[in-house]
Structures are given as C-alpha cells and as structure tokens.
Image (cartoon, helix red, strand yellow):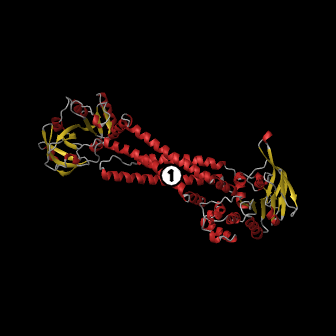
Amino acid sequence: MNAIEARDLSKWFGEGETRTNAVQKVAFDAHFQEMLFIVGPSGSGKTTLLSIISGILRPNQGTVKIKDQDIWSLSADKLADMRLNTVGFVFQDFHLFPRLTTVENVAVPLILKRRKWDEAIKEALQALEKVGLAQRAGLSPQKLSGGEQQRVAIARAIVSQPDILVLDEPTASLDGDTGRKIVEFVKRDVLNEKRCIIIVTHDDRISEFADRMVKMEDGKLIEIEKGQGHA
Amino acid sequence: MTGILKIAYKLLVNDKGKFAALLIGITFAVFLMIQMTSMFAGMMRKASATVTNTGAKIWVMDRSVTSVASSIPMPAFMQDAARSIKGVKFAVPLYLGAGLARLQDGTYQAVSIVGLDDSSLFGRPELIEGNIEDIYAENGFLMIQDAEAPKLQNPKLGTTFEINDNRGVIVGIAKVPASGLFGIPTLYTTFNRAIQYIPSLRSTISYILIEPTSLDAIPGIKSEIDKLGYVAVTQDEFMDRITNFYEYHTGMGTNILIMTAISFIVGLSISAQTFYTFVLENLDRFGALKAMGAKGRELVYMLLFQAGITCLAGYGLGIGLCTVLIAAAKLRVPDYASVITFGNLGLAFVMVFVIAAISSYIAIRRVLKIEPFDIFRS
C-alpha cells in the first residue's frame, strides 16, 4: 500500500485569458519510510501540489488516495478529520501561537482530537523531548530561536503520530547549518517504516537527505534521480 | 471541546494589551449604559414617591394629570360619587400642595404638604417618633425624616414654624420608602388643616384614593369614574403615566435614551474593532488550525467563547464600577437619584449580548473565509 497515490492531478486558477495552470496532469506515488522531496523554482506549482495531496486544496481534476482512501471524495468534516489523524504539517513560517507556551503549541493537534488537556500536555512534552526542547516547554515560542521554533513545529506535527508528514520549505527561515541539522534530524528521528515525509524545498543544500526527488516545472512533474541536482 | 475553549481562553487573555482594551471598552460601555438608565430609574422612583408612599390601589384624578405634582383639584362631590360606586370599599381625599415654611431663624424653606383624610389618615407614613393621634392636635404636622429634612434645620418634636402666618408644630417624625424628586422637605397633616393653611382653589381634592372590595371590582370602578368625566388608575398605571410623562414630554427620557445609545455605539465600536484586529493578527494561526484539521464550527466556538468571556467580564466590571460610583455619590449626596434595577441590568445585558454577537459575527465571517491553502502560500 502506498502512502499517497496521486493520479491525473490538475489545478488551475482563474478562467479564460486569466487562467493559470498551477498543476497539470501530475501523477506520482509516495511510499512509507521514504523522504520525498518536491523541488522546483518558485511558481512552479510545488506548494499547490503539496496542498492538494495533503487535503487542503481541491484539485480541478484527478484523484489523491492516502492509504487507499480517495480523500477528495470525503465530506468537508471527514476531510478535516483525515488531515487531523493522518497528516502532520510543518509550515514555512511555523505558525506557532505566540500566546501559548511551547508545550501548549505542540499539544494543539491532540486538543483538536479531543484529548484531555493534561494528557495532551503530557504527550506534547514527550514530543518536545524527542526534538530536544523539553527544557523550553514553558516558554513562549517568541523566545526561541528560528531553529528551535522549527523543531517545535516538527514536534507539533508528529505529536499525533501522523502517517504523512508534510514540510513546506523547512529551511527557508533558517541559516544553512541549522537548516541542514533540522532536515538531518527529521530523516534520522522522525522518519520510520510507518511514515512518509514529503518536503517541498528549493534548497540544494539539503538534497542529500532525499530518498527520492521529483521536480515541478510549469505545473508539470518530472521525476529526477537523486544526485542530479535541481534548480 | 473544553480543550479548544481553553486554547481560545489562553489566546485571548495572554494577549494582555488587546484583552485590556476589549475589557475597558465593554466595561466603559456597560458603566455608561447602567449609569444612564439607573439615573432615569432613580428619578422615576422619586417622581412616583408619593404614589408608592401612599400605597392606594386606585387613584382618581383629572384626565389631564400627567404627574403627581401636577394635580388638578376635583370638586368635593367626586368623593361622594366615588364612595357610591359598587365595589368601592372606601374612598378618601388626598391633598398635595406646596408651601413656604418660615423657620425659627426667620428664613423660608419650600415644603411639600400632604393632607391625609381626617378620619382614616389613609396613606400615613411610618412614625419614628411621636404619636399619630397628635396629628389631630392644634397645628400638628408630621415631618418626613429623609435627606431633605436638614433643610428644615433638623426640627425635633415640638419645633414650631409658620406657613402662611399659620403656626405649625412638629408632632411626629416619620419615614417613607422613597423621597420626592424636587429636593424639598415633606410635611404631612390632615386634609382639612392642609386646605386651611395653603391657599386653595374652589375645588380642593387633589386625588381620591380608592380601596376596592376586590381586584375584580377595579374595571367596574374605572368605568364608573370614566362616566363621571375623570379617570381612575391603579398604582402601577399611575407610575407608568408618570414615567411616560418624564420620558416623552420633558426630554429627560429621550436624552437618557440617546446617551444610552451612544454608550452602546462606543462599546460596540471599541469591542468590534479590537476583536477584529485580534482576529486579523491571529488569522494565519486560525488558518493553520484549519489546515491541521480544525473544523469551521470549532473555530466559531472559539471566537464566540472569546467574545462571550470578554463581554461577560466587561459586564461584571461595568456593573461593579457603576455600583461603586453610585455608592460613593450617595455618601456625598444622600438623596442621589440613581438606582440599579433588574430592568437596567437586563437592558445592559441585552446590549452587551448584541455587542458580543456583532463583534464575533464580523470576526467569524473573516475566519471562515480563510483558506488553509493561503497559509502555505504565505
């Protein structure tokens, strides 16, 4: 069973002369225990593709199956539940709540899953331990460095044990060394046989960590061999 | 659900600046709304003081009477006519007037005079000092011990004064549930002495007070009085009549209504704008929550909870502030006309509820429009 099966995906914005084809007839699979990189220049459609396969942007055409379930045939509520239970998100700008403590931020997905507050905090602490930030649990994310905030975002993404972890430009807000360390950590400590990690990036410096890479160009997907480099 | 609401609570109260601004806005609005309406309620209570103090079930008066103070004298036969109506247990005259009392040091003080029916003394106040029978003694008057009493130079039993060159003697000191609106002391005496001391028109009865045999008899009594060309109203109807007069015929009510509306608008503006800014600042985080799997209705609950908490806290603080101010004012001005009624609280609550509803509606519309995809694009 594949983690993700995307077939014939197309997404366009606008109509008529203003129509922009962001994704055009894209098909690919993503597997468990695989770190898949989606690379490509800005505006090539990689973020749009990531949004479609993670269930937050409806395609105009095509299907996306996550663990054999066609996600775009689900109702809005079921789709939200699918995202909550199956996909973990690490956003480019982290989007941590500055008014919550670090551990409370990490506990948010568990709270959304209706876990009791104390239980959620306990599990969030364990997730923070995994990313090496247990000692920062009581601080506001604003008091953490960029790398630390990224690790908090990763802890938040993995706290509910998702099958698929999606990272959008995880190194964009970090310096080169910190970015490398983060991706290395994700590969070493977060990836496992029950999980698929998809990273959208245009950062060449981290390509060595990819198990497989696909490249987006003008909305079309080209699979590239690892080590070929990308734009 | 409680976990989500706890997150909502923390997001709100940990943003101390915005939360304080929201609380100040709502508190100030509630304070003004309650202050305005309680002032009006206090004045109306005072304007109806004679009605409540007398306690008669039915009041007969000229059709044109709009307030207690503006009584139009009725001829004596009206009392007999009222007594002869079926369902009337008893009917007694009441005199209400004003005079100038010359005090012992030679100064003059305006006073309100209440003349009670000589035989029954119906509507008499509760005595604190003296004997009620002494009101029949020569020149006997009861003085009401209220915030206005010092204006008579705090007389004691036996203190004398003059009204229209007639000697008056304080034979009793009494209290009433409410004091009058016009800030002058009140003296009670018998009906006949009152019309003897105060210059009067040919007709002398200000009001006829009727005790019906039963509540069922009231419609019949009203109908019969109506046939005589006068009007009979119950105590509540008379108080409504008085309130109506001050509310719509003096400008007092309209002004207070305008001030209340302005308070509402100020509260709404501050609250809605601050709450909207709060939501705008957290928009990307709400979007992130949506992307993570939060449902639209859960975000709506969060916003409603935040708006609800703010408004309830502001409501409580506003009431507290208003209570403190009224209490402080009454220390300085004992007769300060302001009273917080359940009606005031209810009105303010409804207005706060509307503020919360509008503020959260604007925020909810914005939050529901966020596409999680926008979070990725940002």
Q: Callout 1: few (<14), some (14-19), or many (20+) C-alpha neighbours within 10 Å?
A: many
Residue at horizontal 87%, vertical 55%?
Answer: A222
**As drawn, B278 above or below B199:** below
Residue at horizontal 60%, vertical 68%?
Answer: A138
Q: In which quarter of the image is residue B220?
A: top left
User: In the image, A109: left or right of A225?
Assistant: left
User: Which secondary structure lies at badge 1?
Assistant: helix
Which of B166/A113 is in front? B166
Residue B229: horizontal and vertical position, in percent? 29, 27
**As drawn, A28 above or below B43:** below
Q: In which quarter of the image is the N terminus of chain B?
A: bottom right
Can residue A206 be seen at all in this image of the molecule?
A: yes
Q: How many labels does the image show?
A: 1
Residue A193: horizontal and vertical position, in percent? 79, 68
**As drawn, A137 above or below B11:** below
Which of B217/B134 is in front? B134
Q: Report the residue marked by disc 1.
A: B311
Residue A223: horizontal and vertical position, in percent? 87, 58
Residue B70: horizontal and vertical position, in percent? 28, 34
Instruction: Look at label 1 and name its amino acid.
Output: Cys
Which of B39/A38 is in front? A38
Can residue B118 be seen at all in this image of the molecule?
A: no
User: In the image, A25: left or right of B108?
Assistant: right
User: What is the chain letter for disc 1?
Assistant: B
User: In the image, B265: left or right of B365?
Assistant: left
